[in-house]
Image (cartoon, helix red, strand yellow):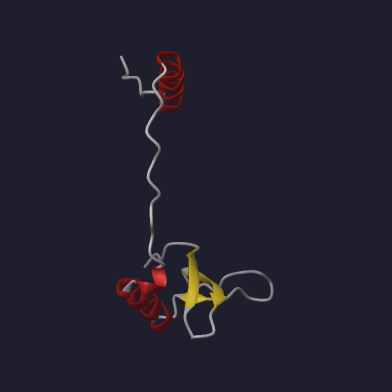
Amino acid sequence: MARRTPNLARNAARARKKAGKSGITPKPRRAITVKPPEADPATKRFLSDLMVREEAAKLTKGGKLPLHATHVITQDNIDGTVKVERARFKTF
């Protein structure tokens, strides 16, 4: 017989309902602070390597990505850095 996977949404709803009945309020979640990716040296290196290998490219006028590219350049910044999004994996 196959093992059943837990229904996380149902369990969360039950926990909220149960917490409301007992009068206990859940602890507020802490805000997560995330440093901007531009500040990370590994991110800078990754982006520069993408540009050197020409794996990041802008979309053509037809809205297609060139065949050699794996990432789409979504934004060019004034300081020369770029924002990219993965579009596909490279098959050798």
Q: Position of residue 79 (x, y in %)?
A: 49, 85
Image coordinates for residue 91, horizontal then vertical, percent: 39, 64
In the picture, which quadrant includes the N terminus?
Answer: top left
Quarter of the image where one finds residue 89: bottom left
In percent of width and height, residue 16 lies at 44, 23
Q: Nearer the viewer, residue 20 or 16?
A: 20
Quadrant for residue 21, please give it.
top left
Please state the horizontal and vertical placement of residue 64, each as a whole percent of the image.
62, 69
Residue at (49, 85) in percent of width and height: 80
The number of numbered badges drawn on the structure is 0
Left/right of residue 78 with respect to residue 40 in the rendered view: right
Question: What residue is shown at x 39% (from left), y 21% (from top)?
Answer: 24
Q: Is residue 53 above or below residue 86?
A: below
Quarter of the image with the C terminus in it: bottom left
Reply above or below: 74 against 78: above
As displayed, is residue 36 above or below residue 23?
below
The residue at the point 40 percent across, 76 percent down is: 47
Image point (44%, 80%), residue name: 54
- Closer to the camera in the image, 56 or 43: 43
Does residue 6 appear left or right of residue 9 in this picture?
A: left
